[in-house]
Amino acid sequence: MTGALDEMDAPPSGETVAPTASSAGSGRWRMLLGSFVLLVLLVSGLFWFLTRNEESTDDAFIEANVVQISARVSGYITQVAVNDNQWVKPGDLLALIDPRDLELRIQQAEANLSAAKARHGAATQDLSVVTTTSRAEIGQAKAQLEAAEAKVDLAGKDLSRYQALFGRDEVSRQRLDQAMLDKKTAEADLRRVKEQLAAAMSSPKQIDLKKEQEAGGQASVEEARAALDQAKLDLSYTRLISPVAGRIAQKNLDLGQLVQPGAAVMAIVYGPPWVVANFKETQLRRMKPGQKVTIQVDAFPNRKFKGHVDSLQPGTGARFSLLPPENATGNYVKVVQRIPVKIVFDESPESLMALSPGMSVVPTVELGSPHP
């Protein structure tokens, strides 16, 4: 009986039952609720993006100080004292260049210095002799001049006296002629002595010439001494010495190799490393020196290093490239620029020994952390 009633109440086959008002309202409510939740999520995501306290980038690498070791003299390598990646200390021998050519150059420079000293000594002696002789000649000429002037004066007085006596017939004509001859002879001697004094007085020109020769000899000595010092300095360059403590890198050196001045033969990586992170310019609004940084190194995924922002480069990487862009020419397409940020590790130097220049890192800057 009940089954018959159910069959009577069921709708005919192929007919659709119209939804009730309550079910339609429930569907609209669920749509509104879903839209609201989606809107809340979008607003929350936008708020987090605008107010997040961290900035990160995967465009970051390890950097370190690298000193290039270059040859300063040419020659053949006779000893290589280090291996690849070896730790060296300041003053350690890295390599040795054959010193024999430079040792011969030192001997030649020493011989040139001895010859220059000999020439300078001879010039000094000539100057002393010329100076002494000149002074003696001038003194002698002045003394002879005084004597000659006295003889002329005496001969003149004698001639006057004999002329007076001859006028009174008290002396002979012969005696008067002799007095006149004596006066002429005395005057001739005076002229000769004056010429000698003038010649002696011109000797300062010879002294000046000797002084110039002596000065030139002194300059030759200094030049030869400088050449000797340079030869000794070049000899010291045959020993390639480590200037810092660090690890050998890029060793390009073998026994018997001919090296030329300025040719880099190896590099030394020294000092604590740091990070250069190329952040987008839109990430730098709140970034300041001193903020804390968590550094994830790709080579050590299970370890996080601590550091802080040291400084921001005053210019984009593109601006300091070899060929900076010229936006005033051609079509302009705006591109978000990147600015290098230097990040310094807060770890001890011993814990950073495994970090090498060029390693990829991912730094995360805590924008809300204190900064000076």
Image: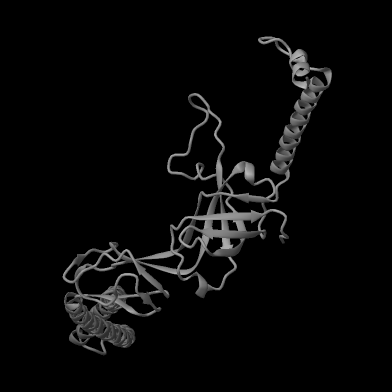
**Horizontally, is 90 left or right of 185 in the view?**
right
Picture residue at 75% right of the left edge, 16% below the top: 4
**Horizontally, is 62 left or right of 95 in the view?**
right
How many numbered marks have been drawn onto this rendered protein structure? Answer: 0
Instruction: Return the residue nearer the eye: 227 or 183.
Output: 227
Picture residue at 46% right of the left edge, 65% below the top: 355
Asked whether residue 108 is in view, the answer is: no
Instruction: Return the residue nearer the eye: 23 or 32.
Output: 23
Relative to 127, does residue 328 appear above or below in the rendering?
above
Which quadrant of the rendered structure holds the N terminus? top right
Residue farthest front in this picture = 1
Locate residue 18: give its quadrant: top right
Residue farthest bottom in this picture = 170
Q: Position of residue 20 (x, y in %)?
A: 81, 17
Locate residue 344: give its quadrant: bottom right
Relative to 33, does residue 17 appear above or below in the rendering?
above
Q: Position of residue 12 (x, y in %)?
A: 71, 10
Instruction: Return the residue nearer the eye: 177 or 25.
Output: 25
Which quadrant of the rendered structure holds the C terminus? bottom right
Indicate how the structure is coloured in the image: one colour
Locate residue 44: give its quadrant: top right
Picture residue at 27% right of the left edge, 83% below the top: 124
Q: Position of residue 270 (x, y in %)?
A: 44, 69
Q: Position of residue 192 (x, y in %)?
A: 24, 78
Picture residue at 71% right of the left edge, 43% below the top: 48
**Horizontally, is 153 left or right of 290 in the view?**
left
Relative to 33, does residue 150 appear above or below in the rendering?
below
Asked whether residue 273 is in view, the answer is: yes
Relative to 109, does residue 68 appear above or below in the rendering?
above
